Structure formats: structure tokens, C-alpha cells
Image (cartoon, rainbow, N blue to C red):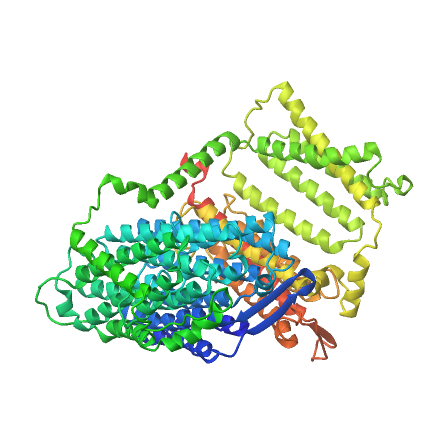
Amino acid sequence: MLALVLAYAVVAVAVPWALGRRRRVMACAAAVLPAATAGWAAAQVGRGAVTARLDWAPDLGLVLDFRLDALSIVMLLLIGGVGAVVLCYAGWYFERPERLMIGTLVAFAGAMTGLVLADNLLVLYVFWELTTVSSFVLIGATRPERAEDRRAAAQALLTTTAFGLVMLAGFVLLGQTAGTYRISAMVADPPGGATATAGVVLVLLGAFAKSAQVPLHAWLPAAMVAPTPVSAYLHAAAMVKAGVYLVARLAPAFGDAGVWRPLVVGAGLLSLLTGGVLALRQHDLKRLLAYGTVSQLGLLMVLLGNGTRTAALAGTALLLAHGLFKAPLFLTVGTVEHETGTRRADRLSGAWRRLPVLAVAAAAATASMIGLPPFLGFVAKEAAMEAFAHGGMDIAVLAGVVAGTALTVAYGVRFLVGAFGGQADVTPGGHWGLVGPVVVLAVSGFALGVAPGVMQKLAGPYADTLPGDGEYKLALWHGLGLALWLSVLALALGAVVFVLFGRTFPVRRARWRFLDAQRGYDGTVEGILAGAHEVTARVQIGSLPFYLGVIGTMALVVPGSALAAALVRGTGPAIPVDRLRAWDDPAQVVLAVVVIGCALAAVRARRRLTAALLLAGTGYGVGGLFVVQGGPDLALTLFVVETLSLIMLVLVLRRLPVRYPPRRRTGPARAAVGAVSVCLGGFVALFLVVAALSRDTRPVGSGYAGLAKEEGAKNVVNAILVEMRALDTLGEITVLGVAAMGVVGLVTSGRRLPSPSGGERGPGEAGSRWLATRGRPPLGGSSVVLEAAARLLGPTILVFSLYLLVAGHGAPGGGFVGGLVAGMAFVLRYLPGGRRELASALPMRPSVLIGGGLGLAVATGAAGWTAGGFPHGEFLQGEVWHGSPPVLGEVDVPTSLFFDIGVYLVVLGLVLTILTTLGASLEDEPDEEEAA
């Protein structure tokens, strides 16, 4: 089952990339996997539950559980079947190849597949959020320049994500109370008590938001700005069913809980009626269907959350029926708009003459929606009437279901008349690629209606897990019973509502404002933003010393006071004072004095450049301490980082005044700053002493040293980074890649970087036989010494960086420090010649280096997974190749070297990114001499 989900990820990338220029072939090829998923699910009907378990990190409780049962099969038929049809439709709907749209639709189908197969609450949550992210892209990516599209995408993301986090809290409460996060185990032995009840409420809130239940439904009508294929799939067949599915999944466990039925049935009835009323107010046919979806989802909540067998049988049938009638209706709107240029009912007339086949198919889908025989919708809704036709408190629910069904009839007829009514005589049209999918889905609803035994076989196993008499079965004819007469009553009431209102429903009357959830959402967002601005204005005052003071004070107040209290009371760790030594080497004293002196001098410095040099001095002093302590790798890395940081800082300081502004602090303010600084430094020193002397277990360093020796590595630090904890290092270099993008975004601030190549020599540009190009030095005037050093020492530094890269397995070095040293070589080329010289030295974008490095690191590590069997294999399995090539003699090449090359490229790419972006910013501004 995990392989199926991973296949979606592969297809989502591969198919658009391979077939992106042929939109129809691409769309149909992408539809193969969803269709195969539906076929596989159909083949599992009647075979019982199928489980799969993947121990990712069992010691940490990270287990991937998957389970295919009757409810999952119904959802997979819906996801795969409707998804395949919609993808094919998309090939004819879009005028140009939409690689992002097709790929994201496939990815969304994979996320939904994982969601309905997940048998673990946390795994389900991961797929839940993947569907949210996919929907955000699908809603807003087609026309990102439109503010309305961006706003709708953000609204869907904010609503579903916020309540998704609420749901996650509920999952944690349920999982901790039950002692397991496995859904099937929790359903078999549900937890009880107040904690479990609170968890149930939180989970239901998340489900209500995902399935657009009133009052959390505003995001769904707003999302109708998305293209028709997206609306037909996400907002009719798949995504909005996630909350309903979760309710159905947990109903056997918590249906008897005190809060379950009032919450689920109450929210469902409210949505059923509110959605129906709001649907009648719409002229936009897509918004009409969107509010109709809110109404139908409410009915599904009532049925699947009721916790009885007959209601579950009706709900499961309606779950599939809804996808088979609502998706083709959305596709109908898309086709009508595609052919006529509008989807407003008050502007359409006579479309049935131009699209006769489409009109018939839409009428069939509408008939299923309003509950006419012999369609599946009729079978499901008659079962819904039967589920609540037993007196007692169910009478109120039954009345709500009948009223909601009547509203469905009214807005269903309004849809048909609005889309196809009128007498205009137009030429028949409509491509079969747009009409065919509608026909396929409508015919499927008809076929399952005339063969209710098939639906009984699909829905029965799940319904049988709930309490009930076990006698009712889905059928077209149950005799002239109460359920049939209630269905007739609903049809009659719906017809009356349509006749009374028709096209004149009171759309803008103030009495309906209380139903406008969009106003509530807008008000909530505006209130949150206003509150955030108020808090920010009071807390973020633009003073860096203030921020540091707050952080330092909190560090002293919370952990500092706790440590002091423990030491004073004697409840803290016992400190062997006799083990304290002032120093291990006299050189430490000298270096400590240098560090302290530089730090104090930096505080007193009035020139910015002086302060920068003194700060670098503190860093070099700490590097010297690393050398004394026997850490050459750390020292080398720190020296290079300090050098690069100093150069970057000097470049930035050119845009700032030479001196700091006059101090404005009063005497008490200076005293407070000094006190906080001294106390914080003392606390950190004391904490380190206590932590070091209180250790009562064996240090882990010796264990790492032993493992490094087994791998044949003499450099323990590098072995830890690229062999033992390679996955952590991969995450760190990924952060470096993200940081590079952040640097570009912050420095450029939306403006386009100028090209560093070509051009005539301008004012201040350097020209020298030592340089490959004529560029403008970022530090001002040209320097022959610097130019000669760049040309002569640059290659030497690069060779040294390669030595550090290759030697990292057995000597100080590695990809990280090697990449930094290589960056130094390019900095040396940049200083005398600017960005043009840098572009001449390395004619490729830094992003290529970063992407290539990340790709190489991932490929090298993933090879270990492949060799050991995913996921049980190790990420980056350490192997060493021994050989004796000519000239080089005996050499050892570890697999970690290739991972280290990836690190090298990413670090070098980061340095070059900073250089190019800062260079563009600095070279765009004239020097003070030029300005004068």
C-alpha cells in the first residue's frame, strides 16, 4: 500500500515532465494510476481487511500502519474513478499544457489515497495536511496574478490548517488515552473518560472544517474561483469527503459517546438546511453547486455520524452517489462556460440546443441528486428516510432530512433551468472530450442505481460494524412504505419551492445576512491582524538591544533562578570541586585574555569597522582555544567562517555611516544593560561548569570514536557528520539551501538582479591584465596587489579546498570546510573585479550548485536505503573501495565521499549566492565620491 502512495508521487512528477507539451496525452496518462487504483480496490471487494505495517523507527513509536477495508474501498473507488475521469476532462478543458495543475491533481489523489488507507492517526494527519497543501496550490496556482484567487486559496489553507491543528491535538488526546494511535485498535477498544471526550470534540471540529460544515463552510464557495476540474474533484468528490470519512471511521468507536451524536447530527442538519437555502440564492452555477455540496455534506454527516446500521448503509451509498452526480454537474458548468463564456444562470439561454448530449447527462445527474429513481441517489435517500422513520427523537432528524431533500430538489431544478433553459437557437457544439466524462459519471450513477445489489455488497460490510437490526438492504423497491411516501413528499415540496421562487429568490434581502459566513471569516481575520499589529507595535519596537535584553532577562529569570535555587538549597547535582582546574594549558589563558579584551574593546568602539574587526578577533581567539583542545576540524571551520563573515560584514558596512550614532542611554540604562550582560555571562559559565562536572554517565564521544574506527575513518568529526548522522547533515544542508533563497529574497526585495556579464567599462570600473573582465570593485578603487593575488592564489586555494574535501575521511577536512575554503577563493576573485569577475570565474548560477549538491547527497544516502531494503536499510551505508590506480598508488574511496561532495557544492553555492546578491545591491549604488 505504501508503494501505491509512492507511485502517485512518482507519476505526479514524471508524467508532466515527460509529456508536458502534449496536454491531452499527459492528462490521460496521468489518469492511468487513479483508474488502476479504483480497479485494484474493486478487486478487493469481499476479501476482508488487508493490512500492512512498516516499522520506520519502532523504538520511537514511528510505525506506518495501513489498512484496506470496506469503507476504504468505497473511498478508493470514488477517489480513483472520479479522479481518472476528471484528469481526462482536464486534457480538453485547459487551452494550454498545465503541468503544475495535472501534477498537483495526481499528487492530491495520492494524498487522499494515503489518507483513506492510513490506520494510524498521525499518519492520517500527515496525509490530511498534504491534501490541504495540494488544494492551496490547485486553487491559487492557475491565475496567481488575480487577488481573488490568492485570497480564496489562502482562506482554504487557513481554515483547514487551523482546524487541522485542533484535530491533531484531539488525535494526541485520543492516542494517549487509548495507549495506541492505531485506528483499528482504537475502534475495537475505544477509550473513555473526560480526556477522550475532549479529544473527540477536537477531532470533530477538524472534520467539520474539512467537510465545510456550517459555520466553517465559507472557504468552499470562495474556492469556486479554481478551475472546473479542481472543483469537480476536490470540492465534489474527494477533499471535502475527508472529514465525512473520518467521522465514518470513528463512528463505530464513539457513536455512543455523549457528545458525539448531538454534535455530528446537529452540525449536519444545520449544514443541510443552510446550504440548501444559500444554494437557492445563487446565480453563479458553480457557487450554487458549492452551497449544494455544503448541504449534501451535511446530510452525509447526519447519516454516517448517527452510529446506526441503516444510516451507515444509506450514508455509504450516498457517499459514492454524491461523487457520481456532483462531479458531473461541476464538469457540466465548466463545459457550458467553456462553450458560452459565462456560467451565470441569469445570462444563459438555450444552451440545451447547443449541448443536447450534455443537457441529457446533466439532467440524469440532477435526477440522482434530487432522488429520482432509478438512480443511485434515490436508493441512498430512501434508505436515509428509513433510517430515521422509527419515532422518538429521530422524528426531528427525519423532518430535517425531508426539508433538506426538498431544498435539494428546488436548487437542482433551478440549476437545470438556469444552465439549459431558454429558447435561443444556436448551433450544436461541445467537444466529446468535455461531454464524454459527464456522460460516463452520470451513467455510472444510473448503473449502480439499477443494480443496488452491487452497492449493498460495497456498503454492507462497513454498515454491519454498527448496531442495528441487520435486515434493511439497499433496493430500488421496498413497497409503498413510509420512506417512499416521504421521498414523494420531499419531491413535491421541492417543486413547490421552485415554482414559488423560481428565478426570483430574494437574493439581497438583509434578512439573509446572518447566513453569510464569509463576513464572519473576514471579520475574524481582520480582528486577528488588528490584534497582531497592536501586539507588534507594543513589543517589536525596533530596538535590537531591547530584544536581546528581554531574551537575556528571561534566560536569567527562568533557568537561571532555578539553577541558583538548586545550588543554594543543595538539591542540585553534586559538584566535585576538586576536579576544577583553572586551565589545562597556559596558552588557554593567553587566548582567553585575547577574547575578553576584544569583546570589551568591541563594546567601547565608536567606529563600525573597528567593532567588526574586534568581533572577528573574538572568533579567532575561540578558534585558537579549539586548536589547543585538539579540535583542528572545528578550528579550521571557525577560522574560515570568521574570515568570510568579516568580509561580508565589511561589504555591508560600506552602506552605513563610519561611526555609530552618539549614545543616548542614561546612567541607569547603562547599568541595567551591564548587569544583564554580566549576570547572563556568569549564568552561562556556571551552567557549563555544573553540566560538565555533574556527568555521571560515559561520554558518547568514545562510542563515536569506536564506530569511526570500524568504518576506517580517522577523522571522527567528519565520520559523525557524513556517515553516522548523515540524515541530520542532509537536513542541515537543506536548511542552507533554504537560507540561500532567503538571502536572495531579503536583499533583492522583489527587484530583479542585473546581469553580471558584458557591458562597457563605466565610472569606477577596473581594467587590468590580471582580471578576466572589466568590473567595478565592490570596495571602491582597484588594487593591483589584490588583483594579482586573486589570479595567482585563487587556483591554489581551490586545490587546497579539494584536498580538504578528499582528505576528510582520514585527516582534518571534509565537505563543509572544503566548500568554505573554495568560497574564499571566489571571494578573492570577487573583491578586485566584482560580480562580473565572479561570473567569469564560475559561469553558472549558484542555485545549480545548491540543487546539484542536494541531489547528490540525497542520491548517495538513498542508495543505502535501496541496498538495505527501504525503510530498514540505513541512510548512506558506509562502504570503502580500496584500489591502486596509476600515479596515485593505494587509495581508499568511501561512499561518504560522494555525500561530502554534495555538502561541498551546497556550501559553495551558499557563499556564491551571498556574494552575487550582496554584490548586486552594492554595485547598484554609487560611491560617495561619484554621488558628490
Q: Quadrant of residue 498?
A: bottom left
Front position in the image: 121 or 264: 264
Front position in the image: 458 or 675: 458
Front position in the image: 332 or 142: 332
Identify which residue is drawn at 39% across, 56% down: 391
Left or right: residue 105 versus residue 96 is right
- Give the position of the C terminus as an image quadrant: top left
| Residue 345 in view in this figure | yes
Identify which residue is drawn at 84% across, 35% down: 570
Q: Quadrant of residue 590?
A: top right
From this view, report whether residue 777 is shown above or below residue 248: above
The percent position of residue 288, horizontal first and vertical second, equals 26, 56
Front position in the image: 461 or 548: 461
Identify which residue is drawn at 25% across, 71% down: 434
The percent position of residue 507, horizontal first and vertical second, equals 21, 46
Query: How many numbered marks does the figure carry?
Result: 0
Left or right: residue 848 versus residue 709 is left
The percent position of residue 445, horizontal first and vertical second, equals 31, 72
Instruction: Give the farthest residue toward the top.
Output: 667
From this view, report whether residue 671 is shown above or below residue 771: above
| Residue 157 in view in this figure | no
The percent position of residue 922, horizontal first and vertical second, equals 47, 44
